[in-house]
């Protein structure tokens, strides 16, 4: 059985508190790469690249103690957006991956600082093709032959 490997990164975004953001990220060690670009006389922009064993962003386990507010649990990127993202920015996550050549997938997700989220998937092309070309057959990717 094969593993699904991804390439994951974000757009450039600003944060409310640079030190607090960077301190929080240290808990994830080498599971992600952080790029910072300081603009002369402007804000610092960040981008993150997934660097886990499978190329995605860290997976965060539920807390050992539910009453401990210092332990985070839930969606990593939603937490980044709601706790650190500058109110005027949108955080976009791009992910593509494959399990050998059996499954190829991709998704893009965008968050604002209020946890509002939109996403799209490359698998959505099948439905879009059916709507755009109603008299044609659209064969979805399947490991079995059509």
Image (cartoon, rainbow, N blue to C red):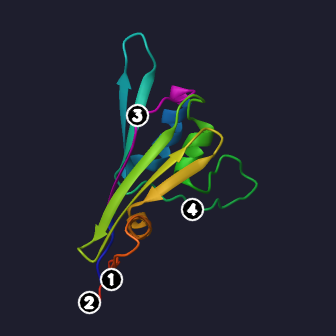
Tell me if residue 11 is in the magenta stretch: yes
Q: Circle 3: is it few (<14), some (14-19), or many (20+) Cα within 10 Å?
A: some
Give the CA separation, mark 2 to mark 3: 41 Å
The vertical placement of 42 against 1, above or below, is: above
Residue 85 seen: yes
Residue that badge 2 annotates: 145
> Looking at the image, which residue is at 51% across and 46% down?
110
Tell me which segment is drawn in magenta.
Answer: 6-19
Residue that badge 1 annotates: 142
Contact between marks 3 and 4 (CB within 8 A): the answer is no
Contact between marks 2 and 1 (CB within 8 A): the answer is yes
Tell whether 129 sits left or right of 62: left
Farthest residue to the top: give it: 41
Could you say where residue 95 lies in the image, as x and y percent from the top left? 38, 55
Could you say where residue 130 lies in the image, as x and y percent from the top left? 41, 71
Which circle marks residue 61 in the picture? 4
Mark nearer the viewer, 3 or 4: 3
Give the CA separation, mark 2 to mark 4: 39 Å
> Looking at the image, which residue is at 37% across and 17% down?
39
Tell whether 87 sits left or right of 46: right
Mark nearer the viewer, 2 or 4: 2
Give the secondary structure at mark 4.
Answer: loop
> Looking at the image, which residue is at 41% across and 72% down?
134
């Amino acid at each position: 059985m094969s593993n699904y490997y991804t390439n994951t990164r974000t757009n450039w975004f600003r944060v409310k508190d640079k030190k607090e953001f960077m301190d929080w990220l240290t808990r994830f060690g080498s599971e992600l790469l952080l790029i910072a670009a300081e603009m002369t006389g402007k804000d610092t922009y960040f981008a993150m690249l997934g660097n886990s064993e499978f190329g995605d962003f860290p997976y965060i386990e539920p807390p050992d103690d539910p009453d401990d507010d210092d332990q985070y649990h839930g969606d990593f990127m939603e937490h980044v957006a709601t706790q650190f993202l500058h109110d005027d920015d949108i955080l976009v996550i791009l992910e593509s991956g494959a399990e050998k050549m059996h499954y190829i997938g991709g998704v893009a997700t965008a968050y604002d600082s209020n946890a509002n989220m939109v996403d799209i998937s490359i698998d959505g092309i099948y439905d879009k093709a059916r709507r755009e070309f109603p008299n044609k057959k659209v064969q979805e990717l399947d490991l079995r032959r059509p």
